[in-house]
Amino acid sequence: MGDERVKTEALKVINLFQVLPKLVVFDLDYTIWPFYCECRSKREMPSLYPHVKGILYALKDKGIDIAVASRSPTPDIAKTFLDKLGIHSMFVTQEIFSSWTHKTEHFQRIHRSTRIPYTDMLFFDDEDRNIKAINNMGATSILVENGVNQQAFQQGLMEFSQKSKASDKAGSSGKNKHK
Ligand SMILES: [Mg+2]
């Protein structure tokens, strides 16, 4: 499937949901591309998982911001690859640094620079411990097995929308209690 075709499909999926995230955050290694960039050379030409570019374009088209949260120890290689793939400038912020925390520090920085609440964020990553940590911060976090694809994307939007509805209900019943 070409990028345009994936973008059209992804837009259809986005249009199924009334409640949407304000920011979608992506891990890099084994989430948007099928390798660890620390094991590669800057001179190589990288490639993304097949659906990634179309999904990124669809999000931009709908005015939804995108960001990167990666614990890669080689941010220079990661940034060179994002540039070579022509997607470097699409991200509102890129947090790429190694850390002992499970990306909580990455998300604190993303929140500081974007001012977007964690509950308005959707996050894709291939590591369970990161998913658990960021879910605990309030962002809807989706574990991907073979990188971000249409299926994972739809699942992410669905979980985000269900979580928002649940917290809306909790909020309004809380309000009623005070009446
Ligand atoms: Mg990864």
Image (cartoon, rainbow, N blue to C red):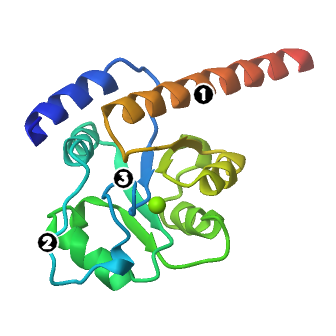
Residue 107, position in %: x, y?
57, 62
**In which quadrant is the C terminus drawn?**
top right
Residue 58, position in %: x, y?
23, 38
Q: What residue type is labelled 3?
A: Ile
Q: In which quarter of the image is residue 120?
A: top right
For disc 2, the neighbor class at 10 Å (few under 14, some 14 to 19, many from 20) is few
How far is disc 2 from disc 1 in space, using C-alphas? 39 Å
Q: What residue type is labelled 1?
A: Ser
The tag earlier along the polypeptide, 2 or 1, is: 2
Q: Name which residue lies at 38% across and 79% down.
A: 38
- Pick whichever, 130 or 135, lies toward us: 130
Q: Is residue 167 visible?
A: yes
How far is disc 3 from disc 2 in space, using C-alphas? 23 Å
Q: Mark 3 points at which residue?
A: 66
Under tag 2, what secondary structure? loop
Q: Name which residue lies at 71% across and 18% down.
A: 169
Q: Residue 45 — which label?
A: 2
- Pick whichever, 51 or 21, lies toward us: 51
Q: Residue 164 — which label?
A: 1
